[in-house]
Image (cartoon, helix red, strand yellow):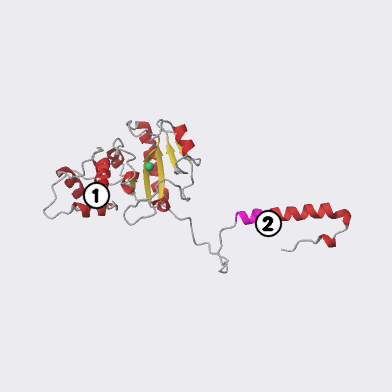
Amino acid sequence: MLLPSFRDVPSRSVPLARLLLLSMLVLLLASCAHAPPRNPLAQWVPSPNHNAREAILVVIHATTQDSVEASLETLRTANSGGPVSAHYLIGRDGALYQLVAEDLRAWHAGPGAWGTISDVNSASIGIELDNNGIDPYPSQQIDSLLRLLADICKRNGIPREQVIGHADMAPTRKTDPGAQFPWARLAQEGFGRWPRAPLVDPPAGFDPELALRLLGYSSDDHAAVIRAFHLHYRGIDSEDSGLDAEDLRILYSLTIVPGK
Ligand SMILES: [Zn+2]
């Protein structure tokens, strides 16, 4: 871009020329601020055939705080535990807040994995529910969540079964949304994976560890995975890392039974 030289301008016009120069620089900087990142190593030959990167997973959280106001503060500041965020926050009264655009990477999942997804933040939409980790979830909060999930899954083309809890992908660090979360209610609307009744005993040779892997549990910490499985499918938070007959029936239904 060509800019006027001060040496070419009569002295009486210098303030005007300076103003013009400043205006042009502001315009130049403004246009740069909105330009897409381009690799200077390559020639920019733009194509219209693209769209924003899309999520393929939804992760449900509990805030484990005492109020929606406290969580709005935590999710929007560099709090003492480090900055965190989520795309959405739902209050106990069902009020819905959006904090991050869906096509951007919110910081809700942290280290962990689900199936082959090792960077869950890059592949997911995070929804926080105002819950202290102990209380039941009010029906109006779950109704609001169900409306949001239907909307998110439809617009983003995310399969309804691709809805998991934070504990599922980070079983060594997290227990949310916790034992009180109504996964069965979500399953009535087709969200998340849920065993199909009637449950039957698996045949001899059934491998529950393989079944857990097929579901998506990726941690090598067996006790942590079983705890997350019990939180999700039995509604219990237990230190018992064994699998009972009901656990095996559930795993068989989720992963092996024809028609699933
Ligand atoms: Zn969480």
Residue 241's quadrant in the figure?
top left
Residue highlighted by disc 1: 222
Q: Nearer the viewer, residue 130 or 150?
A: 130
Residue 236's quadrant in the figure?
top left
For residue 61, the mark is none
Q: Of callouts 1 and 2, which one flags the residue occurring earlier in the amino acid sequence? A: 2
Vertical side of 122 occupied by 231: above or below: above
**Magenta-highlighted residues:** 29-34
Q: Nearer the viewer, residue 49 or 233?
A: 233
Q: Secondary structure at mark 1?
A: helix
Q: Nearer the viewer, residue 195 or 178?
A: 178
- Residue 14: horizontal and vertical position, in percent? 84, 54
Q: Which amino acid does the dot numbered 2 rest on?
A: Leu
**Quadrant hosting ligand 1:** top left
Taking the image as shown, residue 216 lies to the left or right of residue 30, namely left
- Residue 140: horizontal and vertical position, in percent? 37, 32
Q: Which of pointers 1 and 2 indicates the residue nearer the eye?
A: 1
Q: Dominant secondary structure of the magenta stretch?
A: helix
Taking the image as shown, residue 19 lies to the left or right of residue 175, namely right
- Residue 252: horizontal and vertical position, in percent? 18, 50
Q: Which amino acid does the dot numbered 1 rest on?
A: His
**In the picture, which quadrant includes the N terminus?**
bottom right
Residue highlighted by disc 2: 28
